[in-house]
Structures are given as C-alpha cells and as structure tokens.
C-alpha cells in the first residue's frame, strides 16, 4: 500500500475496522463520506453496527446523501442511529424514520455543511472518509464521491480514513476541492462554467487529526436503475420538442444550458433519451453522474460533466472505471456545497430536471412524502436547483399502482416545491409550460397536458366547482385532500375517476 498511503509513518495509524470503531462513543456525532451510494465509508460503520448489537450505542450520522452496502440498514437494525441527515434511500431506515424510531432531518443538500459550519447541527466528533490514496502531506484523494467529506474532515476533531484499493489510482486528479470561507469574509465562488476548476485535487487534512487508517477492498453498491420504457421515452420526447422550440424561438442556443438531473430511474432514463435528439456539445452541472451521463459523454451529446458523485450500474461501471483516464479531462467531482450552490446555479443558468411523487393542478410539487406523512427519501438537492435554475422542470408518470393513483391531484399532500419554483411539468401525456401563467391558467394547462385521461374529468370537475367559490387560487378546502384520504382508506383513487361529480 506504499503507493496509496504516502504519508510518512502511516503504519503507526493503521488499524482494523473493529479497532477504529472503538474510537466512536455513545452520543457522538459522526460525519461520513458517501453520496447516492457512491464513495461511502464502508468497513468502520459496519463494524460499528456489529458493536452496537452488543452494547448500548447511539450516534447522530451526517452524510452527503444516501449510502450503499447496506450501511444504513445495518446501523438501523443494530439500533445505532439516534438521528440521521440529510438524505437516505434505505427501506429499513425509512421504516424506522416513519415509525419515529430514528429522527430524520430533511435538509437541502447545499445547506448541510453550511449549518454544520455554524454549529446548528452540533459538534462533529469524528469524520470517516473513504480514500483512493493519502498524499505525502496527509491529504485525502477521494473515491467516487466528494459530498460533504471535505467539510466533515475540516470540522471534526478526528478523522478516520478508509483507504480502499478497489478504486483505480487514476482517480487522483479528478476532484476539485474548494470550500467557501466563513461569513462575513466569504468571496464569490468563481465557478463560471461546468468545466471550471477552482480548488485542489485533494482534501487537506492536518496529519495530527488522522486517528486511524483502515485498509479496505469493498466496491460501491451498483445502481439499480431500471431501463427506459415507453413512458420515460415519451417524457424525453416531449422535452426534446420543447428544447427545439426554445432554440427556434431564440430563447436557447444550440448547446442549450448546463443540465442537472435528479437521481433515480426516471430522471436517468429521461436524460438518456436526449441522446436520440441530435444535440452535441452539451454540458452537465449536477449532483450525480448516472449511467445516462456516461452514455451521453460517450456518444458526444455531452462535452463535459460536473457533479459530486458517480453512481453507475454494473454494466456501465465495468466499462467506465477501468478506463477512467479517458474521461478525466471531461469530468470533475466537487463538494456538494459547490455542486448545489445557488450562486453558481443561478449564474450559469441550469436546466434542472427532477422527479415528482405528485403535483397538483396549480403546479405545487411533492417529492418526499407519500400521502403527506410517510417519508420516502428526502428533498435532496432538488430544491437547490428548482428555485435557482434557468428552467425548473419536474417529471412524473401520470399514474402509479397500475392506475389506482393519479400523480396529478387537486392539492398535493405535502409541498416541497411551491408553484413559484416550477416552470415546466411533464408526464408521458404531454408538457405543461407554466411560465407567465396565472393559477387558473396553470390548472387548465396541467390537466389538459399532463393528467391521465382516466382522471381528467374529475380534476376538471374539482377545478370548475372551486372556481365557483372564487379566489385567486380556487380550492374546495373540504375536498382538497380527499383523493389522498381515499388512498389511505382503500388504496385507490379510482372512485373519483368513476364518479367525477363526487370528487
């Protein structure tokens, strides 16, 4: 490991994962690497879970976003989590959150280290960071994600480094680590394009803070995105037509503007659909590079891609990682505070494409809570981009559960992105351009363009009866959430499709 652990005397800090886990005490706040199942610290958290099965131990766990390798599930099953933030996708943890067993703080991803830096999240005791290598000065070369690792390493009292030799050494040089100064001495973040580099290729860590070095060999969990289907291709086709019309009208240039796409199968499939449109030389300024981004880099649709993590399926990963040298001049990974920074998003003019669980007839979007109460994953970075993007796009299939649930409802059961932050809504049925529209105009456009034909009559009936009562944004307050109540009681909204006058 001498070529990966280049810090003189590093052997004196070498420990097993079990030994390093003993440094973590009950009640501590721990910050770990990891963003969307990429680059998470693996061995020490799993060793901690085993320890928590035998003794009373609960921690507050801060990450970049979601973790892979069943880390969240293992810690949850062991009863080791008191509080978790800011994002997760694990079923076991989700169940514990919804039962109130684990406290979950759902935070905009750009704000996590900002809040930690100012002490709002408590003192960070230990940071556990996965590394490709450690430099001669003790700096960390990250792996497949940066996330909040750099700030956790700076803020924590001690740092545990997991040096994972499953990663190619050629990752060194891929990252661009820049952290804003504390207020009031902060200066502008000079990212002016997706391919801007303003920092260092490593995370600076004083050697005296390194409490343990753990040698590992465990890969990231592969992405489980499902392939594109007819519905996602139709959503992509609607967006392609929209972009071509924007170019023809002079509102966008041939290279459009940098793209952001949220995580998950739908956004991945829709973004991949852009590869059929004949666009060339586009750029991406996003949180995560999924399979679609690599494919678009390969076929020339994308010229450059900036993110904070790379999360790939098995097939694309097997092709990409051994050939990382071929991509290093076209990809950069940044801290999520920079990848999601509103200042940069507004400056370079992002086209943001994120997924909605549901949206209502006025354009309010729910991306986190099923029927208003059950947490799915968290808001993630969608709010960072939606409010500050040049174009804020939300996509969704028009129905779920084989048509039993309409994704377009009279009023969303939880608001993550208000109508003020939403420009475009798209389903497989069509695209609703809401720019410049008043609420009553938005409702008719959304119902006509996006709703499934099965539910359009009921949505129109609700809207027209609400208009009779009046208001700038007409609603029937006694019925606004009745569609969700039906799901809670019977698992279906089909009653309203069958009897729209009773909606």
Image (spheres, grey):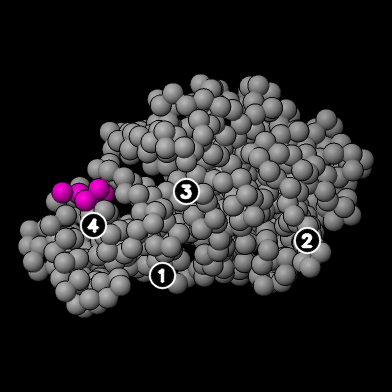
Task: Please tell me the numbered disc located at residue 444.
Answer: 4
Q: Please, which residue is most extreme toward the front here?
A: 249
Residue beneath the point at 57% across and 34% down = 283
SS state under label 3: strand
Relative to the observer, which residue lies in front, 169 or 434? Answer: 434
Sequence-first disc among 1 and 4 = 1
In contact (CB < 8 Å): disc 2 and disc 3:
no
Q: Is residue 57 above or below residue 355?
A: below
SS state under label 1: loop
Task: Please tell me the numbered disc located at residue 391.
Answer: 3
* Magenta stretch encompasses residue 172: no
The Cα atoms of the two marked residues, 3 and 1, are separated by 37 Å
The Cα atoms of the two marked residues, 2 and 1, are separated by 41 Å
In contact (CB < 8 Å): disc 2 and disc 1:
no
Task: Please tell me the numbered disc located at residue 99.
Answer: 1
Determine whether, in the image, residue 62 is placed left or right of residue 301.
Answer: right
Where is residue 478 shown, x and y percent of the image?
21, 78
The Cα atoms of the two marked residues, 4 and 3, are separated by 21 Å
């Amino acid at each position: 490991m001498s070529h990966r652990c280049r810090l003189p005397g590093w052997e004196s800090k070498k420990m097993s994962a079990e030994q390093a886990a003993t440094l973590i005490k009950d009640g501590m706040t721990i910050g770990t690497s990891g963003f969307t199942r990429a680059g998470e610290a693996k061995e020490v958290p799993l060793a901690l879970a085993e320890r928590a099965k035998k003794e009373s131990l609960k921690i507050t766990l801060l990450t970049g976003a979601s973790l892979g390798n069943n880390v969240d599930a293992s810690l949850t099953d062991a009863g080791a989590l008191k509080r978790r933030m800011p994002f997760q996708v694990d079923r076991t943890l989700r169940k514990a959150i919804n039962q109130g067993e684990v406290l979950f703080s759902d935070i905009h991803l750009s704000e996590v280290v900002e809040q930690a830096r100012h002490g709002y999240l408590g003192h960070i005791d230990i940071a556990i960071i996965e590394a490709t290598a450690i430099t001669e000065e003790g700096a960390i070369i990250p792996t497949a994600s940066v996330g909040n690792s750099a700030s956790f390493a700076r803020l924590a009292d001690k740092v545990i480094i997991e040096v994972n030799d499953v990663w190619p050494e050629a990752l060194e040089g891929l990252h661009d680590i820049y952290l804003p100064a504390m207020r009031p001495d902060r200066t502008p973040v000079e990212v002016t394009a997706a391919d801007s580099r303003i920092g260092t290729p490593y995370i600076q860590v004083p050697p005296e803070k390194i409490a343990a070095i753990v040698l590992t060999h465990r890969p990231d969990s592969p992405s489980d995105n499902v392939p594109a289907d007819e519905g996602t291709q139709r959503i992509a086709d609607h967006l392609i037509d929209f972009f071509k019309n924007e170019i023809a009208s002079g509102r966008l240039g041939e290279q459009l503007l940098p793209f952001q796409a949220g995580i998950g199968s739908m956004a991945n499939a829709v973004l991949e659909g852009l590869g059929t449109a004949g666009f060339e030389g586009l750029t991406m300024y996003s949180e995560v590079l999924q399979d679609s981004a690599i494919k678009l880099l390969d076929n020339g649709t994308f010229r450059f891609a900036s993110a904070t993590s790379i999360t790939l399926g098995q097939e694309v990963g097997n092709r990409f990682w051994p050939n990382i040298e071929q991509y290093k001049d076209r990809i950069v990974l940044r801290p999520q505070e920079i990848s999601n920074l509103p200042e940069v998003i507004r400056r370079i003019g992002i086209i943001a494409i994120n997924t909605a669980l549901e949206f209502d007839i006025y354009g309010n979007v729910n991306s986190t809570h099923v029927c208003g109460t059950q947490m799915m994953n968290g808001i993630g970075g969608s709010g960072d981009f939606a409010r500050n993007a040049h174009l804020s796009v939300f996509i969704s299939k028009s129905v779920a559960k084989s048509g039993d649930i309409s994704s377009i409802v009279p009023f969303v059961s939880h608001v993550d992105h208000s109508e003020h932050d939403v420009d475009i809504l798209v389903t497989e049925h069509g695209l609703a351009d809401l720019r410049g529209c008043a609420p009553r105009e938005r409702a008719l456009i959304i119902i006509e363009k996006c709703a499934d034909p099965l539910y359009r009559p009921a949505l129109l009936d609700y809207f027209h009866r609400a208009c009779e009562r009046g208001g700038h944004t007409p609603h029937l307050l006694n019925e606004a959430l009745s569609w969700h109540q039906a799901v809670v009681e019977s698992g279906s909204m089909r009653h309203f499709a069958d009897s729209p006058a009773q909606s």
